[in-house]
């Protein structure tokens, strides 16, 4: 029997920063393909699934991990330290999912300050009883020594605002099929796109992929929430007065929300030629407002309660303004 | 040191820029706080331009186009007005006073009105004080 030289397996890590856990679950969603993955790769660090400690990662030589999927935004000192540590230990660092890519839902905290968040959570919220107004402190002395917890920052940042990122795999969460495709491309040694690219997604918009009917001149006098219309199931959401992020969002998810009769919320982020999804939406939505006179236009604008939150639902920390001015 | 506002202004080529030019050739005096960018039509002013202006340190943004009915591309100034109203609501949510943005119609013959407008807007922005966006973006980077 000829001696077969086993190809060294890839070392793979998955880590979460400020995230909901959905991205890790989307990795688990490879289901039985996990066996294919494990044929080619060893998981060396994955807090949701494996008991490997931070100190074990610290002990690894630099560049030891071939591929790290980092999901979640950077909101506290632990996220930042881990982002820096994993950057050092990893050859190819991927910002996995909307939060690492653009700030994601945790990034909506950039509409508030740390103080506003703390007073809401530790004092005002309906379920809180805290007469002494006790707040978490990063360090606390007990007789056994000093206990410490991460420092909560005032601002949420994207992964690439903290460390250099090789690739972005977008989505909230990314489609598992895209992850498998990207992974197989890496193990088969296929040529990778230039560093800094978005992978596992298209460079066309959702509207290019969408099969809903569109007419040439859209003109809307009242915007509505999805719950307020009876969707006809075939015409463009925008034409029905429901805000759809399609014009400012990259395809690649197989138009999964629209297929499910819900408008796109923008989780895949903008295509390369759109620098800022929200300002693209301000333009696209602004233009279809009906009427030429100010009062008519104002009345229609009034029907959009929260343009900032809608248009930057997944991308506030990555946007031109980055956060609310407070 | 007194605050000297920086104002970025987008003027449509056909009416407002010509109006500003008239103010210049007629040697009218007006506040030198404005940096003029000529665009083909007020409808060309993408929200991105306005947000970028604030990001790069503008304290106010002034957009001028042809009077209603006079746009050389028919609908451009109406589109501008629609986006402008939506943008004002948006910047207000972002903690930027909505009147740091102004939209006015200036025709090619309204050099005097343009000069007055710039003086007046400069004073309004002076009242607001410096816009903090640039500082925030810089400290976050
Ligand atoms: S706006 Fe939404 S519903 Fe309309 S075409 Fe684009 S993706 Fe489809
Ligand atoms: S349709 Fe939009 S919100 Fe839904 S998964 Fe795709 S990109 Fe994300
Ligand atoms: S050409 Fe002047 S506003 Fe359109």
Image (cartoon, coloured by chain):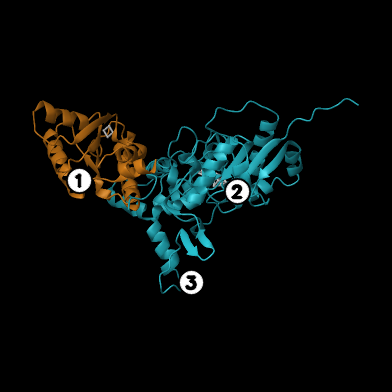
Chain colours: A cyan, B orange
Give the chain letter at badge 3: A
- Work out whether residue A198 or residue A167 is closer to the camera in this orientation and state it: A167
Q: Is residue A43 left or right of residue A325?
A: right
Determine crowd level at label 1: few under 14, some 14-19, many 20+ residues with C-alpha closer than 10 A: many
Q: Are marks 3 and 2 on the same chain?
A: yes
Q: Which residue is mark 2?
A: A54
Q: Are marks 2 and 1 on the same chain?
A: no
- Above or below, A112 against B17 in this view is below
Q: Which residue is mark 3?
A: A127
Q: Secondary structure at mark 2?
A: helix
Query: Rounded to the nearest whole Å, what is the CA distance between mark 2 and mark 1?
Result: 51 Å
Q: Where does residue A193 sit, x and y in percent of width and height?
A: 58, 28
Q: Where does residue A314 sit, x and y in percent of width and height?
A: 48, 47
Residue appearing at x 45%, y 63% in the figure: A136
Q: Is residue B16 visible?
A: yes
Residue appearing at x 15%, y 36% in the figure: B114
- Above or below, A277 against A242 in this view is above
Q: Which residue is mark 1?
A: B125
Q: Where does residue A90 sit, x and y in percent of width and height?
A: 59, 36
């Amino acid at each position: 029997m000829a001696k077969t030289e086993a190809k060294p397996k890839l070392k793979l890590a998955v880590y979460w920063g400020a995230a909901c856990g959905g991205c890790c679950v989307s990795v688990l969603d490879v289901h039985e393909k996990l066996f294919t993955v494990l044929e080619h790769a060893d998981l060396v660090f994955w807090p949701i699934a494996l008991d490997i400690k931070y100190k074990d990662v610290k002990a690894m030589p630099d560049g030891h991990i071939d591929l790290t999927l980092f999901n979640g935004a950077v909101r506290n000192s632990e996220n930042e330290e881990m982002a820096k540590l994993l950057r050092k230990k990893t050859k190819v660092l991927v910002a996995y999912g909307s939060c690492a890519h653009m700030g994601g839902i945790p990034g909506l905290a950039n509409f508030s300050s740390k103080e506003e968040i703390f007073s809401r959570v530790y004092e005002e919220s309906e379920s809180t009883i805290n007469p002494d107004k006790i707040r978490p402190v990063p360090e606390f002395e007990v007789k056994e020594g000093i206990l410490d917890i991460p420092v909560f920052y005032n601002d949420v940042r994207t992964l690439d605002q903290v460390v250099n990122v090789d690739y972005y795999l977008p989505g909230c969460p990314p489609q598992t099929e895209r992850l498998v495709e990207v992974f197989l491309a890496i193990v088969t040694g296929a040529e990778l796109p230039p560093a800094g690219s978005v992978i596992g997604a298209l460079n066309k918009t959702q509207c290019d992929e969408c099969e809903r009917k569109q007419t040439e001149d859209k003109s809307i006098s009242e915007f509505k929430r999805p719950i307020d219309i009876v969707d006809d199931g075939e015409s463009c959401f925008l034409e029905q007065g429901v805000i759809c992020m399609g014009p400012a969002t990259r395809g690649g998810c197989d138009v999964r929300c629209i297929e499910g009769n819900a408008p796109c919320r923008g989780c895949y982020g903008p295509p390369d030629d759109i620098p800022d999804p929200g300002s693209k939406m301000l333009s696209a939505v602004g233009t279809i407002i009906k009427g030429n006179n100010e009062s008519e236009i104002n009345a229609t604008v009034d029907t959009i309660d929260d343009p900032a939150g809608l248009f930057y639902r997944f991308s506030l920390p990555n946007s031109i303004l980055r956060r609310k001015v407070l | 040191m007194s605050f000297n506002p920086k104002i970025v202004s987008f003027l449509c080529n056909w009416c407002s820029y010509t109006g500003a030019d008239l103010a210049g050739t007629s040697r009218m005096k007006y506040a030198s706080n404005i940096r003029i960018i000529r665009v083909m039509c007020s409808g060309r002013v993408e929200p991105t331009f306005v947000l970028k202006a604030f990001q790069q340190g503008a304290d106010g943004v002034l957009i001028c186009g042809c009077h209603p009915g006079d746009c050389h591309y028919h609908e451009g100034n109406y589109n501008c007005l629609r986006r402008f109203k939506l943008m004002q609501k948006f910047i207000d949510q972002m903690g930027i006073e909505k009147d740091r943005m102004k939209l006015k119609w200036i025709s090619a013959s309204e050099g005097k009105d343009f000069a007055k407008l710039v003086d007046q807007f400069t004073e309004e922005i002076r009242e607001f004080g410096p816009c903090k966006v640039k500082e925030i973006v810089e400290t976050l980077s």
